[in-house]
Amino acid sequence: MAASTAPQTTSGSQPLTGSAVPDHTTPGEVPVFQSITASLLESISLEELRLRDYGAGRTPLTTAKPNLCSGPSGPPVKLTVRSAENGSSEFRGTMLTFEVGADNPESFLIHEGVAKRASEFVRLALQRDWQEATNRIISLPDDEPDIFEIYQSWLYERKIYTPFWLGAEQSADEPVRLVKAWALGDKLLDIDFKDAVMDALINRMRSISPAFAGYRRLNAFIYSITPDKSAPRRLMTDIFAHEGNANWTDDPSCLPEDPYTADFLRDLAKEQYRLRQRLVGSSQVSGEDSGPLYRSLEATCRYHDHEFGKCPRRA
């Protein structure tokens, strides 16, 4: 296997390009997929092949800077600007193996420095007298390889990837995949990744799903895999509080007979009370309501978990 170096395109090689998402890329802009391992002979490692194969069939979801808005979502920008010079310690040394899945787990190799920088779980696991600190293998039997690929690409490219889109049609699985990715980030204690996934989820919802059809049916699923007061739950209650109507309550797919529906309705009632108080207060001052927070590029930190003033999108 080639020696590990910083993720850069080797001399003489051509960057791979992906397909542009409608309304989310500027003219002439294409994603660039770069090598995470390289040598003077330009040999390609198995992990590079995995990333290239994954990236070639997907396009990156990115969020917009508030001062660059040109439409509902604005031009795409990188969520986090991170540069690593050739020979950076993050891309040297020990490789960690992540075994993902239960029946036939797939193995993913991640540089230890990269994983420890991003994941508090990994840092703790490698510092303590745990099995992971000895064998350098982290097992994730309850997670899916396809979802971990999203995380792997984020670690090296700081982008959230989504499957190809055909015209204006949205993949029915995309919101589910993104919520699962958020849950993985929550398990690994990677706040930046969770916040980036929420930005991607909101950005897509805000730009192509005015009826919120792909999102309003997710409440039972979201509540089954996320903790109390988490960002995905806050987003779901906000969607119902601000966009919902009586027809939604008659749709069994929106409010299924599920134990988690009761938790969702409790949170929704709380948000409705808060909304009424905001409406009364704002109407007395300006005569109008400011609207749901997910519509404002300035206010999406409501759905983030980072410390105050440390939003990676504004770094």
Image (cartoon, helix red, strand yellow):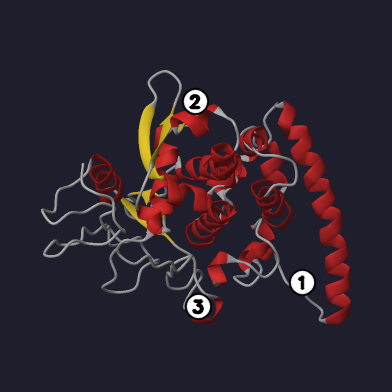
Q: Hey, what amino acid is under mark 2?
A: Pro
Residue displayed at 75% across by 46% down: 229
Query: Which residue is nearer to you in this view: 152 or 72?
Result: 152
Residue displayed at 50% across by 78% down: 69
* Image quarter of the C terminus: bottom right
Picture coordinates of residue 55 (x, y %)? 30, 50
Residue displayed at 11% across by 64% down: 12
Residue displayed at 73% across by 72% down: 290
Q: CA distance from mark 2 to mark 1?
A: 46 Å
Q: Earlier in the sequence, mark 2 or mark 1?
A: 2
* Image quarter of the N terminus: top left
Picture coordinates of residue 61 (x, y %)? 43, 58
Is residue 148 placed above or below 77 in the rendered structure? above
Mark 1 lies on a secondary structure that is loop
Left or right of 46 in this view: 255: right
| Residue, disc 3 | 69
Q: Residues within 10 Å of mark 3 (few under 14, many from 20)?
A: few
Picture coordinates of residue 277 (x, y %)? 88, 63
Question: How many numbered marks, from 0 up?
Answer: 3
| Residue, disc 1 | 289
Callout 3–callout 2 Cβ contact below 8 Å: no
Is residue 44 placed above or below 159 in the rendered structure? above
Q: In the drawing, what numbered circle is on residue 141?
A: 2
Q: Hey, what amino acid is under mark 3?
A: Cys
Q: CA distance from mark 1 to mark 3?
A: 21 Å
Left or right of 85 in this view: 292: right
